[in-house]
Each structure stands twice: as structure tokens, then as C-alpha cells.
Amino acid sequence: MHSDPRAHIASPGLYTDLYQLTMAQGYVLAGVSETNASFSLSFRENPFGGGYALACGLEQALDYLDALRFSTDDIDYLATLTGNDERPLFRREFLGHLESFRFEADVDAVPEGTVVFANEPIVRVTGPVVSCQLVETALLNIINFQTLVATKAARVYEAAKGDPVIEFGLRRAQGPDGGLSAARAAYVGGCAGTSNVLAGRAYGIPVTGTHAHSWVMLFDSEREAFDAYAAAMPNNCTLLVDTYDTLGGVARAAEVGARLRDEGHALIGVRIDSGDLAWLSREARKILDDAGLADARIVASNELDEHLIASLKDQGAAIDVWGVGTKLTTAYDQPALGGVYKLTAVRAPDGEWESRVKVSEQIGKVTTPGVLGVKRFYDEDGRPAGDMVYDTVRPPDGDVVMVDPADATRRKRFAEDQRAEELLVPVVRRGDRVYEGPSLEDIAARGREQLASFDPSVRRFLNPHAYPVGLERSAHAVRTKLLVRARAEQGPAKEETS
């Protein structure tokens, strides 16, 4: 695996929101820090109005958990924080606890490149409540963003129908780490390369690039600029042709391409960054072909996304490579995945697991109680048939029934002998990493294989088919019981144990 150079996260212990630390102090002072808890990370709606998401970011999350410590400088900083009475916010007892803190929980997660859906766990953290609580913010930050961008990239890849897609978005990314994380996630989602050189070094992603309009504008003529670039980069010559007149630029690029060919090199292609990309690309293809440059590729950029690429494909655009920047790297039209990290069960030392539920006026924000797992069932043709969320403490036996949590009358039965796969796999046990992640190339390949296994109706951009995701029948019954009790008592719900 390539190393992650994001050294600006120099204090992983402080890579969190303040309230995680104030709650952790509360747990310690209340004497409940040894209570075990189970938290589930999920998201409430599939992004971009689509039918799925592509899980991403686990490798960086595991790196964070490995590094999680509180340095002397971290402790000294926390000691300077004060409350509204100007007295120290954190007590020495708690700061001493942080000095020796080590992450000691278990983590189970969906492998990167797995197709996932709303309202199912993609990460489960189980163990001492302080360990579980302190990692909430960082896990959400890492998983939310990379899953969002990987999903956007998968949609762009789908629209391109096998053409190479290059991630071009560093200059408009959300800061340095945003650009680096986005390049990695875009590669997982299907991109063939990136313009981001740091991402190339960090993750082994192929790097690619042309030149800017400024190169052409610096010279007295476009032809002079093209000649100079070809002389400087004869083995990497893709010419940007729309600085002044696009088709005139293509004609001049073709002349340069003929000269390169005579010198034993080849014009890689031309890039069009403005105008009517469908018409211009077709005309550019004619010019290049007439010049004997059938192998020269046409690269298109200019605020592309999956919808515009699909439209250009429908118009018969002669585009070979798609450079997608802003709308991919920033996950344009959905700024956040909306992932959440919720407490679902607690266990006192030497006690039994007790389910917990969060009640809300919005049914979509009501949580699922239990130590949650998720199984994916497959039909006789090997296609995914439904994902069932269940309580691992009370696993079902025999045939199982999955209930739609939004409509309890909608149910789906799976046979006892029906092929099923547990999506969450062990990645950390008692704070120690037990999972050796695959290479980035293998993660990207997994993503492509996973997406291909789902019916195209699930992958379509508009009004996608709703893939079945529901609760195992007994888990649904527990959730209903806790909700009824909580609403009746207008207080926290706690499941009775037998």
C-alpha cells in the first residue's frame, strides 16, 4: 500500500468535535467509562437522487484509528480551554485518562468498493463507550466524503460507457485534503487517472495532463505555442485547441501531429474545453482522420458531470476521454452524504446487551436498535436480491422475513438455504487492526464488479429502482416495541432483558 502523506493531521486525538471530548469526560466522571456500547454508521438517503452508494474511505479510517493518541501538546492545549465561568473545561482526572488513552474497541466494516444503500450499517464500532464516542467525528468525516465522491465517480463512469475518465478537480477541491481524498475516491469509483500529482505519488494512481490556455497565450501565435510544446514534450503531447478558434486549433494541432509522426513520436490528442462539445468533437474527428491521425484522441472537459456526458453520448459526440473536474471532486449538487453515527445498544460490564432507540418526529431519523449487522441475499441467478439489517445478538434461524421499516405490510422472505453474504467484516479487534486492505486497483475492480452485478434499473440516474433494504422481522418487532414505549413514556427507551 502507498503511504498517505496527509501530515497536516498531526494531532489525531484532536481530529474531533469538542462535544465528543466533553461527553467522554462525562462518561469518566460518571463512572460509566467501562460500559460497552455499539454504534452504527449509516446514511439516510442514497446520494444524487440515485439508487445506491459506493463505500469508500475505510483504509484512511483504519490509519486514523492506528494513530489515535493524545500527545503532550494535545493535553496542554485542552488544559487551556475554559467554560463559561472561566474555569478549566476539562478536569485533571480526565486529562490524565487521555494521556494513556488507546482505542480499544472492535470495528466491523463494509470493504471499500462495496455497493451499499441507505439505512444499513456500513461501519459498526463496539467496545468501551469512550473509545466508541471519541472516533465518531473522524469516521464520519472520512467515510462520508470519500463515499460521496466514489459514488459520483461511479455515476460518471457509467455515463462514459467504458471511455476513460480523468479526475481534473484539484484546483477547485475543498482544500488540500479534499483534493487528495477526492482523487483516491474517484479512482475507486472508476476514474482511470488524475491530474493530482500528490495523489499519484500517495496512491499509485496514474497521473495525466495537457497544458493550460496560458501556454498558448504566452506565445505570439497558436502554431508557435504548439510547436514549442511538442518540442518540449514529444512523448506527452495533447494540445488544448480552444484558446482562439477551436477547429482552427485542431487543424494546427494536426499539422504538429504529422511532424511528430515523421520524427518517430505521436500526437496523443487534442483537448476541447468550451463550446458545443458534440459538434466540435465530430468536426475535430474529421480533421484528425483526414490528416492520418486516427489514433489521436479527443479529450473533452468543461464542467462535465454524468448527465452532460450521457447527453453528449446520445448526441453522438466523438469524444474519447472525459476530463471531469469541479462537479466530480466537489460532488456537485450534493455537498454531503449525510452519514450518521448512532448508539444502538449498550452493555454494562458482565451484563447483557440492551437495545437503544432514538425517537424523532421525523420517521426517517428514528434509529434501528441492536448490535447491527447486514446480510445481502442473492437470487438463483447470482444477482443481489435484498439487504437485511439484523441484530447480531439475536440472529435469525431458518427462513427469514425482511420488513420494510417504512411500511410494515411490505415484507420479503428469504429461504434458509438461499445464498447470503455478511457485508460487515472484522477490521479491528480490541484496538488492533486485523484487516489487510487490498490494493487500490483491487478496490476499484471490486467496485466495477459490484456495480455490474446489480440490475441496470438500480444504477440509472433518474427514478432508479428501489433496491430492497429492510429489517429482519424480530429486529423490526424490537424497534416497534421500543418506539411505542418511548413515545408513551416520553423518555429514553430501554429494552427489557429476559
Image (cartoon, rainbow, N blue to C red):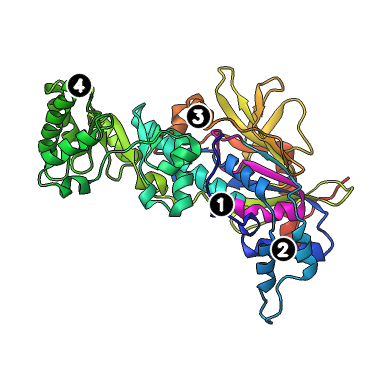
Q: Is residue 217 visible?
A: yes
Q: Are marks 2 and 4 in contact (CB under 8 Å)?
A: no
Q: Tell me the residue that label 1 is attached to.
A: 141
First reached walking from the N terminus: tag 4 or tag 3:
4
Query: How far is the residue under mark 1 from the one under mark 3?
Result: 23 Å
Q: Which residue is mark 3?
A: 441
Residue type at tag 1? Asn
Residue 25's place in the image compared with 160, above or below, is: below
The residue under label 2 is 23
Mark 1 vs mark 3: which is more N-terminal? 1
Q: Which residue is mark 4?
A: 294
Quadrant occupied by the C terminus: top right
Relative to 266, 86 lies left or right: right
- The location of residue 75, given as percent across then percent down, is 70, 65
Find residue 22 and report its image quarter: bottom right
Is residue 127 on the magenta stretch? Answer: yes
User: Is residue 429 shown left or right of residue 41?
Assistant: right
- The reply to whether callout 4 and callout 1 are in contact (CB within 8 Å) is no
Amino acid, disc 4? Ala
Q: Position of residue 493 (x, y in %)?
A: 76, 56
Question: Closest to the observer: 89 or 328?
Answer: 89
Q: Quadrant of residue 419?
A: top right
Quarter-of-image position of residue 475:
top right
Quadrant of image for the N terminus: top right
| Magenta-tinted stretch | 111-138
Discs 4/1, front:
4
Within 10 Å of disc 4 (Cα), the crowding (few <14, some 14-19, many 20+) is few
- Give above or below for 183 relative to 316: below
Write the residue at 11% across / 38% down: 223
